[in-house]
């Protein structure tokens, strides 16, 4: 096996995890030649000669075969990755925001430079889901990919739900353990899970969907009364990323969901992630593994570097073999919406309402709503309101088309008929 020379960008939680896994691996033949960091004054336990602040000294070093990009800043990451590929180096990254937002151009860049870009560590930490989708499911039409894609929120929900820890204390723990992003709002508001879902849409269904087209709702507005409601009904709450193909259309979203206590996902706790794949031939398959943390994510990055040693690259099999499936938000979801002030919610946005409950300390509505409505700012991440929105179970009613326009047309027709009758009479 070739002795791979690595140029590493970033030495935070995942960078240090990579260093540990690389030095404790038995069959890996490679070494980190240089590490580019932003702040040279930070105390580090390695030889200072290993570090530099000069990106070019890695990107232009002909001895370096692979650039590993593990920094936070998605824009700077894109610059590094682009330059590295253009300079004839293969690249490994764990930056899900950068990959999700630029996947089309990164696929083209790989084709034009002939270099490979691997990013297993960007999606669900140690679960080898991208390679599984690429290699094992490359030719099987998939119906659904869903699961728990964010370790921090799963950790928080486990602690809050099962150990009665406060949300703030659980979030602090998730940060201290190195699970959360530097900006944890990306975790708790569902952005991180959405970037991962967007990447998996490419490998599972062959479509690139820009993250801003996918609805993401988080767990940051959950109240004690919502948790109590779930407990009473023997449900748990998990932040679920879900993509489903119905006939030839793909629907996808990230939001908290009520899950039955005997559902497999209920037993996935703390920083563990889970991915359920439903294929046309294989039916359901479940993958569970640590989705966050220094060593599990470092191990995923190391596995990618190792795969480069035998010239592995993603073939984007679904993309090139199956052609494109349209993506749509024009579908109904059954949702639970709790609120403090009835003026906060617009009942008009519901297609139909199954249940309304108003009391002094807990008010909620259960009804069917079009995913498209949720893209509206008044629902999505509006800091002024205190709305909790959960899909009802993972077996929600995805696929039923929104018919609001149709209803309006029917009303119009009825009015027309009444008018006509009056004229005839
Ligand atoms: N912040 C992420 C999570 C890290 O909590 O899942 C792994 O992508």
Image (spheres, grey):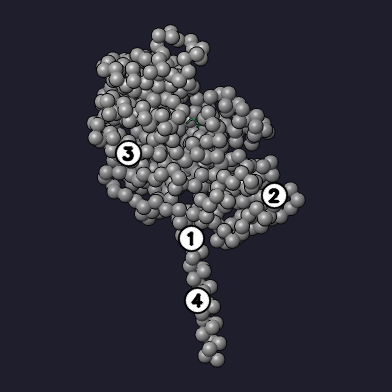
Q: Nearer the viewer, mark 1 or mark 3?
A: 3
Marked residue nearer the N-terminal end (4 or 3): 3
Residue 257 in the figure: left or right of residue 1: right
Say left or right for 119 vs 397. Answer: left
* Within-10-Å neighbours for mark 1: few <14, some 14–19, many 20+: some
Q: Do the numbered discs 1 and 3 sit on residues whose CB atoms are within 8 Å?
A: no
**Given this view, does label 2 or label 3 mark the residue nearer the observer?**
3
Residue 383 sits in quarter: top right
Q: How far apart, in angstroms, are the residues tagged by discs 2 and 1?
A: 27 Å
How far apart in space, not on screen, are marks 4 and 3 (Cα)? 48 Å
Q: Position of residue 172 (x, y in %)?
A: 61, 27
- Residue 355: horizontal and vertical position, in percent? 64, 58
Residue at the spot x=33%, y=40% of the render? 104
Query: Does dot 2 land on a helix, a strand or a loop?
Result: loop
Residue 14's spot in the image, x, y percent?
46, 23
- Indicate the secondary structure of the residue bearing disc 3: helix
Q: Is residue 256 left or right of residue 73?
A: right
Q: Which mark is residue 340?
A: 2
Q: Which residue appears at 35% of the width and 29% of the height?
A: 81
Q: Is mark 1 within 8 Å of ligand 1?
A: no
Q: Nearer the viewer, residue 52 or 194?
A: 52
**Nearer-N-terminus badge (1/4):** 1
- Residue 402 — which label? 1
Residue drawn at the location 47% of the way across and 40% of the way down: 194
Cα separation, mark 2 vs mark 3, equals 44 Å
In this view, the mark in front (2 or 1)? 2
How packed mark 3 is, by other alpha carbons closer than 10 Å (few <14, some 14-19, many 20 or more), is few
Residue under label 3, please give it: 105
Q: Nearer the viewer, residue 269 or 124?
A: 124
Tag nearer the camera, 4 or 3? 3
Q: CA distance from mark 1 to mark 4?
A: 19 Å
Q: Which residue is mark 4?
A: 413
């Amino acid at each position: 096996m070739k002795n791979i020379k690595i140029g590493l960008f970033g030495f935070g939680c995942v960078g240090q995890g990579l260093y540990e896994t690389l030095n404790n691996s038995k069959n890996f033949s490679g070494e980190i030649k240089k590490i580019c960091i932003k702040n040279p004054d930070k105390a580090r336990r390695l030889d200072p000669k290993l570090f530099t602040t000069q990106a070019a000294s890695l990107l232009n070093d002909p001895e370096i075969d692979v650039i590993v990009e593990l920094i936070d800043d998605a824009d700077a990451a894109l610059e590094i990755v682009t330059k590295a590929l253009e300079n004839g180096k293969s690249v490994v990254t764990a930056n899900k925001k950068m990959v999700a937002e630029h996947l089309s151009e990164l696929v083209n860049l790989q084709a034009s430079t002939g270099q490979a870009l691997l990013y297993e560590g960007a999606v669900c930490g140690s679960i080898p889901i991208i390679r599984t989708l690429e290699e094992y499911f490359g030719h099987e039409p998939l119906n659904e990919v869903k699961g728990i894609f964010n370790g921090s929120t799963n950790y928080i929900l486990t602690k809050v739900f099962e150990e009665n820890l406060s949300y703030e204390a659980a979030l602090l723990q998730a940060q201290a353990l190195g699970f959360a992003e530097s900006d944890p709002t990306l975790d708790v508001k569902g952005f991180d899970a959405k970037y991962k879902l967007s990447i998996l849409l490419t490998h599972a269904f062959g479509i690139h969907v820009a993250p801003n087209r996918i609805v993401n709702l988080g767990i940051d507005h959950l109240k004690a009364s919502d948790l109590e409601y779930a407990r009473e009904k023997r449900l748990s709450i998990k932040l679920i990323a879900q993509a489903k193909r119905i006939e030839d259309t793909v629907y996808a979203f990230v939001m908290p969901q009520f899950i039955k206590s005997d559902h497999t996902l209920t037993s996935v706790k703390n920083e563990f992630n889970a991915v359920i794949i439903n294929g046309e031939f294989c039916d359901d398959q479940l993958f569970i593994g640590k989705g966050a943390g220094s060593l599990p994510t470092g191990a995923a990055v190391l596995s990618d570097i190792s795969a480069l040693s035998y010239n592995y690259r993603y073939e984007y099999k679904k993309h090139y073999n199956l052609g494109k499936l349209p993506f749509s938000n024009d579908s109904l979801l059954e949702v639970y919406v709790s609120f403090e002030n009835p003026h906060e919610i617009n009942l008009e946005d519901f297609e139909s309402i199954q249940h309304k409950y108003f009391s002094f300390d807990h008010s909620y509505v259960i009804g069917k709503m079009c995913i498209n409505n949720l893209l509206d700012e008044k629902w999505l991440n509006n800091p002024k309101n205190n709305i909790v929105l959960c899909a009802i179970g993972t077996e929600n009613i995805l696929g039923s088309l929104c018919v609001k326009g149709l209803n309006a047309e029917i009303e119009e027709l009825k009015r027309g008929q009444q008018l006509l009758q009056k004229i005839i009479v």
